[in-house]
Amino acid sequence: MNPPDHIHRLAVVATHNRPAELQRLIDAIAPQCDFIVIIDNASDPPVPHWEVERWPTGRAGTEHSCWVKVIHDPEQPPNLSRLWNRGLQVGADLFSGGERYDVAVLNDDAVPPPRWWDAMSAAMRSTGADAASGHPFGFLGPGEVRVLGADTPMGVSNRLTGWAMLLRGEWDGARFDETMRWWASDDDMSHRARLAGGLVQIGGFEVPNTGADTSTVGVLAEQAGRDMARFEEKWGRRPW
């Protein structure tokens, strides 16, 4: 039985045709969490079906395993926000008894460093924030914590790192706006977190995003433009 102050850890990863990058991410994040949900969006070949496989890890110096589940979702062009929400729903179903849990939403080409989760969760939980990440541009010193609240203006430096963010699972706002299919739903999440319990940025735990912007071409570039327009329609201005 888990102690009453135990906080479960669930990672959500959407992926498409990046098997090497996905493996590298899993190797980096499995030692830091308890559950991984992979949303495989029409990969060819498909991501292997690892449902309920135990992945040996050593989180926090202990011997334990990480439970891995793969969900195959074929929609093309993808609605990334909906894919993320499918993973978030797994967490809501797993912890429907009111348990506390963190959800990391990670791009398949992200590489979280060791103790990334410890740092994000500690800062988020201790400040009462609803979301956490490193600074998008690494502008904070090691261990520096910056809390952004409702009075913080929108801006490219005042947001979550879109490719590696942590959400408080019990927060009822921890869902992405599916009307923003490819871009801007992370900005929407950032703004709603600032308006709710706050958003916290932590220095010294930057996450490489090895394939940044390489997928936003063709129809997805066109969708990105529509998504930014949708954000502006919703909030009255662009996020940055």
Image (spheres, rainbow, N blue to C red):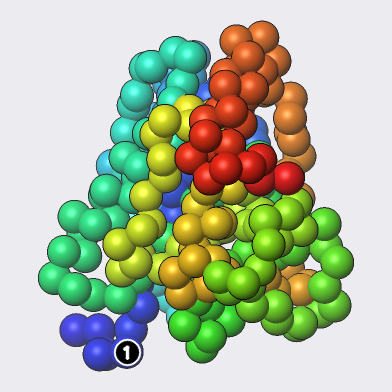
Percent position of residue 79, x then y: 44, 26
Percent position of residue 109, x then y: 66, 40
Percent position of residue 34, x then y: 38, 64
Task: Give the residue furthest to the front.
Answer: 236
**In the figure, 107 relative to 72: above or below?**
below
Task: Give the residue furthest to the left.
Answer: 97
Task: Give the residue furthest to the top.
Answer: 218
Q: Quadrant of residue 35?
A: bottom left
Q: Residue at x 51, y 88 (%)?
A: 126
Total marks drawn? Answer: 1
Report the quarter where the C terminus lies.
top right
Q: Nearer the viewer, residue 143 or 48?
A: 143
Report the quarter where the N terminus lies.
bottom left
Q: Residue at x 82, y 57 (%)?
A: 137
Q: Nearer the viewer, residue 132 or 122?
A: 132
Q: Nearer the viewer, residue 85 or 232?
A: 232
Under tag 1, what secondary structure?
loop
The 10 Å Cα crowd at callout 1, few under 14, some 14 to 19, many 20 or more, is: few
Residue that carries the numbered disc 1 in the rendered image: 5
Query: Residue type at mark 1?
Result: Asp
Q: Residue at x 21, y 65 (%)?
A: 95
> Is residue 54 visible in the rendered structure shown here?
no
